[in-house]
Amino acid sequence: MSTTPHRHEAPPANKGLLALAGVLLAIPIVALMLVGTYAKDEPRLGGFPFFIWYQFLWVVLCSALTYTAYRIVLKARPHVPMNPEGDSFVDDDDTREDGTR
């Protein structure tokens, strides 16, 4: 008996959606690296200089972009369930009449 683990091909990923997720993750990195665009005092918001509230704004924006990228990656890489042993993918034909696997 072979001790080599079974290898199964994963379903193909949508590369366009994965690229979009990468762009969404890169937006806050690029925006915050351009310090010269926001290293100023005016306009003030609630007494805070632009430099401070702009960075806090990016905390919210980065969270939203990261969550959106996560949802896109889930869509781009579909999940295929495996059997309890983990050595083969579960086919729709493996479903019993009562709806269990």
Image (cartoon, rainbow, N blue to C red):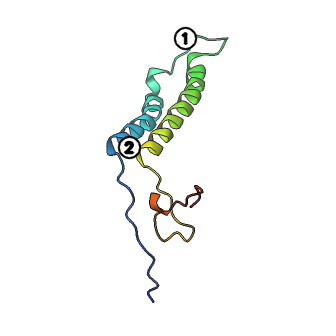
Q: Is residue 12 above or below residue 69?
A: below
Quarter placement of the C terminus: bottom right
Point 45% across, 89% down: residue: 1
Mark 1 burial class by Cα count in 10 Å: few <14, some 14-19, many 20+ = few
Residue 91 in sight: no
Q: Residue at x 56, y 14 (%)?
A: 41
Q: Secondary structure at mark 2?
A: helix
Residue 49 seen anywhere in this rendered image of the structure: yes
* Residue nearest the observer in this picture, 89 or 53: 89
Q: Amino acid at mark 1?
A: Glu
Q: Secondary structure at mark 1?
A: loop
Residue drawn at x 44%, y 42% is 75
* Circle 1 residue: 42
Q: Position of residue 16 (x, y in %)?
A: 32, 41
Between residue 3 and residue 18, name the one nearer to us. 3
Query: Which is more toward the observer, 58 or 39?
Result: 58
Q: The residue under label 2 is which amino acid type?
A: Leu
Q: Measured from the top left, where is residue 78 in percent x and y?
A: 44, 49
Question: How many angstroms separate mark 2 from mark 1 (CA)?
Answer: 38 Å
Tell me: 47 left or right of 27: right
Q: Is residue 62 above or below residue 48?
A: below
**Residue 19 position within the rendered picture, expressed as x and y whole percent measured from the top left:** 35, 41
